[in-house]
Amino acid sequence: MLGYISLGLIGLAAFTALGADSEMASYFFGGPLLLIGGWAAWRDRELGTGAAILLAITLLFWALAASRGQLQTGSAEFTALGACAAVFISARTLAFRTKRANGLSTILLGFFLLAAIIAFLDHIWSPDRIFLFERPYHLGRLSSPFLSANTAATFFGIGVILSVGRLLRAMVGRSGDTRWKYLILPLTTLLFCLSCLVLTASRAGVILTGGFASLLLLWEAAQRFQRGERQSLRALLAASIGLALTASGIVLLSGETFGGRLAEVGIGAGSRSELWAAYSRAALEQFWFGAGPGGFEYVNALSTNAENASTLVFQRAAHNIALQWQLQTGLAGLLTLAGFWLWTGRTVLSGLQQSAKPRWLIRTLVCAGLFVLAHGLFDYALEIPAIAWLTAWLTGLAVGISAPRSRPRPPGVRYAVALAMLLLAAWAMLGLTDTLRANAVRTASGDAAAAILAAPFPTRSGLALARAHADLALSSTPPDSAHAREALDRVLALEPRDGRAEARLAYAFLMSGDSHSAATHLSRSFQLWPYAHPDFRTWRLELSAALWNRLGDDERRAALRELRQVRPEWRRPWLERTRACQRANQPACIGLDEN
């Protein structure tokens, strides 16, 4: 039962919080998932040394983040990763205790069918919205319930593969009306999930789903041939042809939604290769332990240069799960992840060799898992907590089905795992409280805002709350520079890599009349964040213009490099105001005054 509750929470996270793709949502959904996983671990008498090893490794990375002063930055990601372990344990326990594989499959298909119907209707109602909200990108492509259409492709690709697996199962050992009764659910789920998948127009998603669905068909055919079931091979061939024709029909009906994207495959490949080249270089600089969970933003900032700035400034993930782990956890984290999957593969392989196990479901889950991992090499769906949790849930299901019965283990392991998850859930609740308080501060106005700024700054605030106080202080009229300085000092104490905070602290010092300190912090901002996001770029350039006479040569060159990223009509007034390029023979100024 706990496993089903976990699955329901994952669905809620997907459809009510864009896949829990925010710190608040990670805390809000991660906390309950951790409590459920902790309770499941407490009751699981067969929880073994593998869980203890994973727990020890988690504590190692936790201690490393604490020693670096990065615990606050990685708090939400630690919560999401802990919740992955929690849903893995709850799903494993569910599968281990449930004898009916068909029942598990039915619940899963019902979950994906409901999700696909909601997403399909939402897309038909308004292709450029997610429910009632405007989408920032991927307009015209189905992305519901996520922001990214490629993430939705991962989600519905899993549904397609699970439907195909159940469809193949329903074709064995039944005939006539009985067979059709068992075909209704997988066929309906397949049609809706396949339609949603094609409407995402994700090239890698559609191609990889087709590839792993074909692998599942070939695997099933090989198993039947090995068992001598020649008669059923004809039915399997007919089903394969039917699936291919159905998929082709849906692709044709989608029109330019998917076909137009295929024509742009070279453009997508070029931008991906540019990202991967930059991040591969960055990974070598922090090779063993990476930048820490939550550190991608700062790695991305330092990886940006004049050639790749137009692409990298918009990125929130590496678009490759292996590279993402290498960047954030280094080789140690990457080897840990590889070791977990090797252990999982060994357990699942043992299940495939036991005739008493529901091998059809194990094969289906294996193909679904391989699809997610393969798509994760081209996109960032596994960085979205709801997709990571769903993948962990399905992995736990496969391990639970495959694992043989064993003797009860010493209780110390399960007690330690349960206690760790309880503590991590408490940490998530503290993070959620800090985030809620931050939102209250950020949205305050009038007398409420004045009262917050008049009160002493909470010196032991978390990162989110400190940033909110800085936002409020700098946006007030007039800006409260003293309150802003206190808040931003706290931000930089918790996260010294924050180039945005350094620039805002420079502005606070400028407002208080200390232009020397302002120039110092602006210089630090350019070092940490050479090319700012467009929503901050012109603001920092205006600040640079105000401090131009205080800036050193390096900072001036950095500002002129960033100036090349803005429109020519915006550059000219800035150059006239600063007189930055009046001297002759300045390499940094070449071409700046051109259209």
Image (cartoon, grey):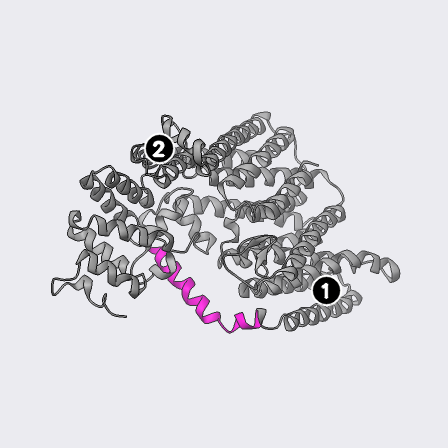
Residue 406 position (above or below residue 402): above
- For badge 2, the amino acid type reads Ser
Residue 482 versus residue 592 in the image, above or below = above
Residue 490 in percent (x, y) is at 34, 33
Question: Quadrant location of the N terminus?
Answer: top right
User: Where does label 1 land, which residue?
Assistant: 225
Q: Which residue is mark 2?
A: 67
What amino acid is at disc 1?
A: Phe
Residues shaded magenta: 258-281
- Observer able to see residue 149: yes
Per the image, is 266 magenta? yes
Position of residue 508 measured from the top left corner of the image (x, y, whole percent): 28, 39
482 vs 183, nearest the viewer: 482
Mark closer to the observer (1, 2): 2
Measured as percent of width and height from the top left, residue 382 is found at 52, 50
Q: Secondary structure at mark 2?
A: helix
